[in-house]
Amino acid sequence: MSQKTESSYDILHFLILFGLALLSIVFLWPGKMSPDSMTIYGLAMGGNYRSEWGPLLQFIWRGADFLIKGPALMLILEMAFFWGAVALMAQQFLRSKWFWWFPLLFLYPSILISMGFIWKDLYFTFGYMLASGYLTKKTFEKTPLSGKEYFFLMVLLFFATSVKYQAQFVLFFMMGWILYLSPRLSSFKKGLYALILTAVMLLSIDIFHEKIMCDKTEETYSWQKVKIYDLAGITVRSGDNVIPPFLFNGPDGTKDQIKAKYSHLWEPLITEADSPLRFTKNEDERRELIGAWRQAVLKHPFAYLSHRSVVLYKTLAGSDVKSPLRLFLKAHRLPTWPANMTIIFSYIFGLPLSLFYIWLSLKVRKGTPAAVPLFVLNAMAVTYALFLFVFSLASTSRYVYFCVTCLAFSHPFAYLCWRKRKERDSDAVITDARGKK
C-alpha cells in the first residue's frame, strides 16, 4: 500500500468515526434526564453548588444552558469525550480488524444502557478514557509529553476526578502513566512524583470545592448515607438494633421497620415519605453516627461483611440493567435480545478477566507497548471495584460503569499482549530445540 493510499485509508477511517459520533448524538438527542440529572441541573441553575454533585460539572452546565437550554450541550460534551477516546485508541489498530471494536463499544450493552444520561459517572468514566486514549497514543509512539500535553491532561483529569468521589482511588494510576512517559526519570522517582501529583491534585480539588465553589450552608454530608445504610444492613443481618435512637423518624422505631425497608437501595430507608430513618441534623449527631458505625462493625463484623458482600455482588452482577435495557431497546424499535445477555457483560465475570489481563500485561511488559494501557485500564477497574466494597451506597450498575468500560476498552490490547506472549513462547521452544542439537 503506497503512502498516499495509506493516508486516504486513514482519513476514511476518521470520517467513519466522525459520522458515527454524529449519529450517536442524533440517536441520543437531546440527552436523557434522571432524578440525579435534574438535581444537578437544578443546582447549576440556582448557582448553589454542592460537592457531592460535582461543582465543576454544575458550573459548566450553567454556562452551557445560556447557549442552549437543557442537556443538549452536555450530551455533546459527553459524546466528545467518548468518541475522542474511541478515535485515539482505534488509531493504534488502523491496519487491524480490531479497529472496529472501538466504535462498536457504543453498542456494548453495559455501556449503552447509561449512554446519554447527564450523570457524573459518565463524565468521570469517559474523561478518564479520553486521557487514557491520549496516553495510549503517546505510549505507542514512544514520545514524551510536551508542556501543552501535560497541561491538557492535568485539566482533563482535574475535571474528571472532581465530578466523582471514587475517582480519587484510581487517579494515581493515571499520574503514574503520565510519568511513565518521562524517560529521564528513574522508576523510583516516577512512583514518588506520581504520589505527589496525586496528592496535590486531590488537595486542589478539595480546596476548589470547599473554599471556592460550594456553599457550606448547603452541605449535606453525603458520607453519612453509607454509614446509615451499613447500620441498617448490620441490624437486619445480626438481629441487633445498632441504629442510634435519634436517627429514627419516630420514638417507636424498631428493627422490623428497618427490615421492611432494607433493600439494594438506600433511599427507601431515608428519603421516602414512610422511611423509618432520617439524616443527622448537627455535628454532635454526626460524631455519634460515626461512633455507632465503628462500634457496630466491631461488634458484628460478619454481619457487616455479609451486608457489604451482597451489595458488591449485586453491583458487579449488574442486576438492574436487564429491564431498563429492554425498555430502551423497545422504545427505539431495536431488537431486545441483547437485554437477555447483560449478565455476560457485567463485571461479575469481568473482574477475574481484569485480573488475568493484569497478569498478562506484566508478563509481556517489555515486549509490547500494548502492555501499558492493558495494565493501567484493568488495574484501575479492579482497584475501583475493591473500594466499592466499603464505599458503595447501593447495588446499581452505575457504580461499576467505570470498571466495565475500562475492561471493554482493553480487549484489543489484551489481544496484542497475548500474541506477543505466544511469539515469545514459540521463540523459546525454537531456541531450546536448537540448543539440544
Image (cartoon, grey):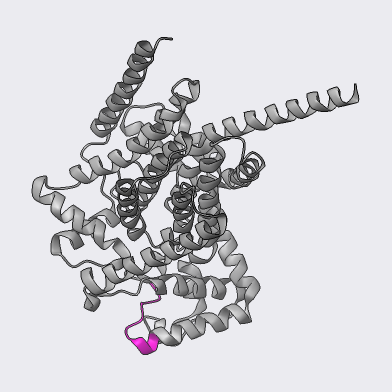
Query: In the orientation shown, which residue stands out farthest toward the front?
Result: 184
Give the residue displayed 48% in from the left and 65% down from the top.
391
Residue 150 location (% of width, % of height): 34, 50
Residue 328 drawn above or below residue 268: above
Give the residue displayed 51% in from the left and 70% down from the top.
259
Give the magenta-colored segment's residue range. Answer: 275-285
Using the image as rendered, state which of residue 372 and residue 333 is in the foreground. Answer: 372
Quarter in which the C terminus is drawn? top right
The answer to whether residue 278 is magenta is: yes
Using the image as rendered, state which of residue 103 and residue 290 is in the foreground. Answer: 103
Residue 369: image quadrant is: top right
Residue 144 location (% of width, % of height): 42, 43
Quarter in which the N terminus is drawn? top left
Q: Viewed as shown, does residue 142 lie left or right of 85?
A: right
Prevailing SS of the magenta stretch: loop
Q: Viewed as shown, does residue 338 lie left or right of 375?
A: left
Give the residue displayed 44% in from the left and 87% down from the top.
288
Residue 228 location (% of width, % of height): 45, 74
